[in-house]
Image (tube, rainbow, N blue to C red):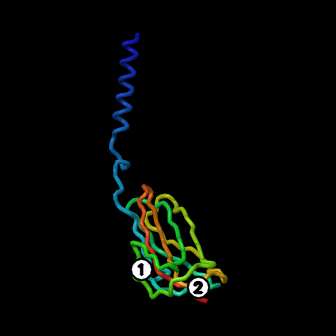
Amino acid sequence: MTAKFNFLITIVFSGLFLWSCSSDDSDIKDETKPEITINYNEGFPQSCTELVRGETYHFRAMVTDDMELASYSLDIHNNFDHHTHDDQGAQCELDPIKQAVNPMIYMENFSIENGLTSYEIDITVTIPNDVDAGDYHCAYSVTDKTGWQSRTSIDIKIIE
């Protein structure tokens, strides 16, 4: 009885192993980062855009991936120390270096519905009346379903 039982167990596990190794779309590896751009008519903000305190804006970017998108984020932070980001495009004329007193900080993450390979980010942001005017960065980030991430940063100014 034990030999028969061992034989059946071997057959069952062999079948499960062969079934689990079958080829399907899950074998396709994602080796491509998603793409993000603001370089289209509705893309906002463009480099060196001046944002007025108290005004409301639609931050818009187009994101795409060859397989499936998962999430995105928007990060607006001061650049009073003149730091840069690796992927930053054109740099604008900067104000003198200064210490932040009440800088604007906006950091939000968002999910993208399942199955999409392209998506237009559209986030409404009001610039608070009491934030420090000056140099800022607007950074968009997008992540695909397998974890690849892309980021782009834009120099902007908040003015009075």
Name the spot of residue 63 as percent of width and height, x first: 44, 69
Q: What is the secondary structure assignment of the residue under circle 2?
A: loop
Quarter occupied by residue 57 = bottom right
Tell me which residue sits at (38%, 48%) in the image.
Answer: 26
Name the spot of residue 61 as percent of width and height, x first: 47, 74
For the residues labelled 1 and 2, the Cα–Cα distance comes to: 25 Å
**What's the amino acid at mark 1?**
Asn
**Residue 2 shows which numbered tag?**
none
Between 26 and 77, the residue placed more toward the observer is 77
Task: Give the quarter of the figure containing the N terminus.
Answer: top left
**37 lies above or below 129:** above
Q: Are marks 1 and 2 in contact (CB under 8 Å)?
A: no
Name the spot of residue 126 as percent of width and height, x first: 62, 79
Task: Give the quarter of the figure containing the C terminus.
Answer: bottom right
Residue 75 located left or right of residue 36: right
Label 2 sits on residue: 133
Q: Earlier in the sequence, mark 1 or mark 2?
A: 1
Residue 103 located left or right of residue 62: right
Label 1 sits on residue: 39
Name the spot of residue 118 as percent of width and height, x first: 44, 67
**84 lies above or below 134:** above
**91 lies above or below 72:** below
**What's the amino acid at mark 2?**
Ala
Tell me which residue sits at (48%, 71%) in the image.
Answer: 140
| Label 1 Cα neighbours within 10 Å, binned few <14 / some 14-19 / many ≥20 | few
Tell me which residue sits at (43%, 57%) in the image.
Answer: 147
Q: What is the secondary structure assignment of the residue under circle 1?
A: loop
**55 lies above or below 146:** below
